[in-house]
Every structure is written in structure tokens, then in C-alpha cells.
Image (cartoon, rainbow, N blue to C red):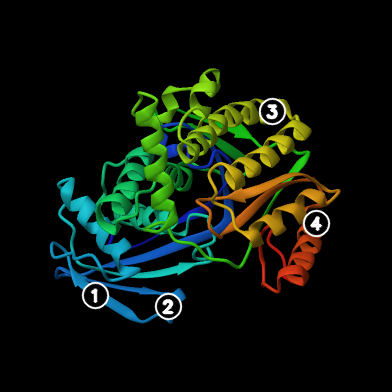
Amino acid sequence: MPDEVTADAPGRVNLIGEHTDYHEGYVLPTVIPQRTHAHITRRADRLVRASSSALDGRWEEYETGRESAGRGWLDYVQGVSAALARHGVSVPGFDVRIDSSIPLGAGVSSSAALEVSLLRALRLLLDLDLDDVALARMAQSVETDFVGAPVGIMDPMASSLGRDGEALFLDTRSLAVERVPLPPSIEIVVIHSGVTHAHAGGEYVIRRRESFEAAQQLGVSQLRDVDTTIISRINALPEVLARRARHVVTENARVLEATAALRAGDTERLGALLNKSHVSMRDDYETSTADIDVLVDIAQRDPAVYGARLTGGGFGGSIVAIARTGLGQSAATQISAEYRRRTHRVPVVLVPPQVNT
């Protein structure tokens, strides 16, 4: 086995299908150019030393087998070694240098990319028999069991299985995957609003709890198990629970329709579904913010854009837009400039990669 390895993993943007994965529903993510790289060197002891270029390269350390949560970003590294140990892997000490171009808190899966890149590197270092789905499941367990962020399976699956130039239609119940090529008639645009978010607590956790309360009142354990044919029953729930359930149920239907539109190259329909998804996230799931709504509105009004929406868990982060091929960069520049003028925030264009305004 090697003593030194390097692996990486991409960030992702979710085209549509928000807050459906923890209800075992449907999602449609795609990878972005930004990646996280993990360079690992084996040690002869049990010590793990980790540094991140995002944190001035300073070193943090712990011993394998003595992982203890509560150490900030190092918890993602500790969680990986703890998860491997739970699966019977004897994890040696190692030094790991982490470099990433994925912005934190932008809603583009920086944590999953970190976990997947680390797991890929350790798979190489230790010659582990872990396929990409098993690796994604383990990455999810890092967040849910160690970090304490109740995330779904979408992010690690997208980071572990996603490829450039395609969307990943994922049934998060069966983990069945269909790779859907992105048609040449569109370009993906992703713009970080400049408002960061976090999933380990706060409103995200509240929304999740409310959605499961709604499911319970509908007599199911997951909102995946109901559809729009019972919308009258959903609307009869207490007001807040009705909104939460209505978003998840209609969002699942939108993912199926958007995937069909993507297969058919129906860009107008795809864009309209993104727009409807944002309205649902804004009004029913209430995960948008005033600044995000401004950014989405500017994008939707751009003549080069078919549709746009908030992407990711919400309460900040990024938007995703579908633009006409050849016009993505100019549209992103114009949208960002207008957003900055109206909100005085500094946006960052992530896709297509360009010099930001």
C-alpha cells in the first residue's frame, strides 16, 4: 500500500429537488468545477495532523480512536476516521493537507466534498473495498452521527458519483441513479449571494422537524409516500405544516417533470419549473431570504435566463440559473452587478468560472 496519496471531490449545485432527500424523494444535482483536494501521508503512530488552506494552513491534531466532537472544521476529519473505525477499518495516523476552491456556506456542498475527498484518499491509502455509493453513505454518517448536521444523502451522492456535463437524477430511497446529459443548448449559472448558511442548527432543523410532523399527520413516515393527488388533505393540515408538506410533495413532482424536460431538451419547461421551485421554497418552505429573492428576481428577468431559483438548504447560499448557451458568463456578470448595486452585498460567480464583479 502507498504511503502518500492525493484525491479530490467536486462541489455540487442542485438543479431542483430541495428538502426532498431526507424524505426519501427525488433530486437532480450536478457537479461544479470547484473541488476539494486531500493530500495524505501515512504516519507510524496514531496521530492525525490536519491543515486547511482555508484556515491559514495551521495544523490541528487528534489521535485515531480518540475522536471527540466540538472542534469546528476538524470534526469532518475526525468524523471520517471514526466512521471508518465503526466499519471495522484500522485507521493509522496520517497527515492531511486540504485545499479547496469551494466556498464555505454557499450551498454548494463544501462539507460533502471534504468528506468524499478524504474518504477517497483513505480508500487509496488503505486499499479499502468501498464503492462510490458506500463511500457516500459513510460521508453522510459523518455529518449525521459525528458533526450533528441532519443532512440527507444527496450531497455526498452527488460529490461521489457526479460527473461533468451531466445531471444526476437520484431516487434517494432506492439510491437508483440515472445520468442525464446536460443539453448543449443550456449553460448552468451559479452565483453565491454573499450570505452564508449552516445546517447544523437553526431554521434548517426546524423545517426538517415540521415536515416530519406533517408527514405523521398524513399517516406516513416520509412525505415521499404521498403525492399531489392528496393536495386537499395536505391543505387541510395546520397552516405551517400544510406549507411544509406542500413544498416537499410538489417539489418531488417538479423533479420528475424537470428530469423529463432535461431528457427532451425542453429548456423553456425546465426554466419554468426552476421558477416554480423558488416560489415554493420562498412561500411554502420559507427557506429564502430577502437578498436571495432579489438575486433570483434579477436572474429571472435576464433575457438570457430560462429560469432561476435558490439552491441548497437555504437561509443564504447560492442561486442556480439555466441560461442560453454562450450567454452564461455575460448574464452572470450583469446579474451580479445589479445585485451588488441593489443590496450592497458582494456576490461570487461560481459557474461559469470567471473574474467576479
Residue 149, percent across and down? 34, 54
Mark 1 or mark 3, which has the lower sequence index?
1
Question: Which of the pair 341/70 is nearer the observer?
Answer: 341
Badge 4 amino acid:
Ala
Mark 3 or mark 4, which has the lower sequence index?
3
Q: Residue at x 68, y 35 (%)?
A: 273
Which mark's residue is nearer the viewer, 1 or 3? 3
Q: Disc 4 to disc 2, how far (Cα)?
A: 32 Å
Picture layout, residue 68 above or below residue 269: below
Image mark for residue 261: 3
**Looking at the rendering, which quadrant does residue 294 occupy?**
bottom right
Label 3: element kind: helix
Mark 4 or mark 2, which has the lower sequence index?
2
> On the image, numbered disc 4 is attached to which residue?
331
Which mark's residue is nearer the viewer, 4 or 1? 4
Residue 162, percent across and down? 51, 43
> On the image, numbered disc 1 is attached to which residue?
61
Question: Which of the pair 275/83 is nearer the observer?
Answer: 275
**Looking at the rendering, which quadrant does residue 52 occupy?**
bottom left
Label 4: element kind: helix
Label 2: element kind: helix
Q: Disc 4 to disc 1, how far (Cα)?
A: 44 Å
Question: Which of the pair 133/291 is nearer the observer?
Answer: 291
Q: Residue at x 24, y 75 (%)?
A: 61
Residue 242, percent across and down? 49, 34
Badge 3 amino acid:
Ala
> On the image, numbered disc 2 is attached to which residue?
55
Residue 149 vs residue 145: left or right?
right
